Amino acid sequence: MDVISIGEAMVLFTPETSGPMRYARDYTSRIAGAEINTLIGLSKLGHQTGWISRVGSDEFGAMLKNAVRGEGVDVSEVAEDDEAPTGIFFKENVYGDHVRVHYYRKHSAASFLNPESINEDYLTEAKVLYITGITPALSDSCSKAVFHAIEKAKQHKMTIVLDPNIRYKLWTEEKARSTIIEIAGHSDIVFPGTSEGEFLFGTSDPEGIAEALHDLGPDTVVVKKGEEGAYYSCLSKKEQGHAEGFRVKQVIDPVGAGDGFAAGVVSGLLDGLPLKESVTRGCAIGALVTMVNGDIEGLPDRKTLELYLSTKSD
Ligand code: CKP
Ligand code: MG
């Protein structure tokens, strides 16, 4: 296994019409969830990935497991819960590309993940543990599961990668800040956005954010600047710089871009590419994801990625 992640996937409903959802009548259903988005992105590029989770033993749980398995991610460590249901959420396209997300995930099956959900042998055979700030926000037991996995990953010298993915709807600002900072302190690589840097450290300056994170421990920090690209900094390799972003003519759906970005950077590093090239791969995948409706549908396979990188146009 190359990469393992722990987190909740949900069935995503998107109205067929834009505008307030009170007027929506028809919806399309898809699958989503930050951790599976990244795992699927990696899997499409040929990396071996595994997902640790819980779904309800209901139709939506079956849909998620089938779909994630179908994308090549191992689901053997996804438990089924006879009582709690699979979480769902809605993406409301209020106007233009302004999207609002509505969760129906409280007390979902995944929110009952706990340290016992982590099969240590399964986890520690992988090279990378990929964590986002969403899982610890779901419940106390989810937070404990994340810290337990981190402890085991460290014992086995796995690389720990964190995308803060701060979701203000899921926890208080204080809890979010202290928990993300604690996880960052255990991580090797962190992918904050500039607004997450502002929230965590009071600065949106990419170099300032990277410095604040390096002080906590991580050797590599990549600060996402949306369409403008990303700033990267690796202490041990003494590499710092800026990777150009990709201009997208029309953003169809911005949600999931960060997860695609993470898949690209991690994929590049697994392939042994220099950090700058890995970050460029991340930027390319982030851009590709925004051009397609849905979180996972725009994630490219190798051929599509190479084609996009070679033409650098949309
Ligand atoms: O930061 P991103 O837009 O890349 O993340 C999107 C995902 O897991 C989306 O799939 C949604 O379900 C979530 O983040 C979430 O829980 O907010
Ligand atoms: Mg994100």
Image (cartoon, rainbow, N blue to C red):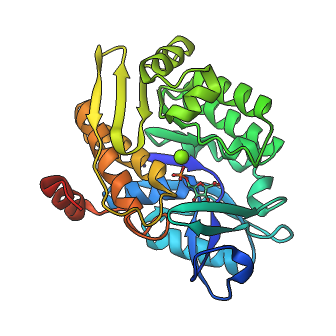
What percent of the width, then of the height, locates residue 154? 56, 26
Instruction: Relative to 24, say whether 288 is above or below.
Output: above
Image quadrant occupied by the C terminus:
bottom left
Which residue sits at x=66%, y=46%? Answer: 134
Q: Residue at x 86, y 70 (%)?
A: 83
| Residue 299 coordinates in the image, percent (x, y) | 37, 62
Q: Position of residue 129 (x, y in %)?
A: 52, 39
Task: Tell me if I can see residue 183 in this picture.
Answer: no
**283 or 68, which is in the foreground?**
283
Q: Quadrant of residue 57?
A: bottom right
Q: Residue at x 51, y 47 (%)?
A: 4
Which residue in the rendered view is the most extreme toward the bottom?
25
In the image, taking residue 202 as reference, residue 298 lies left or right, namely left
Q: Is residue 243 left or right of residue 61?
A: left
Image quadrant assignment for residue 199: top right
Q: Is residue 292 visible?
A: yes
Q: How many marks?
A: 0
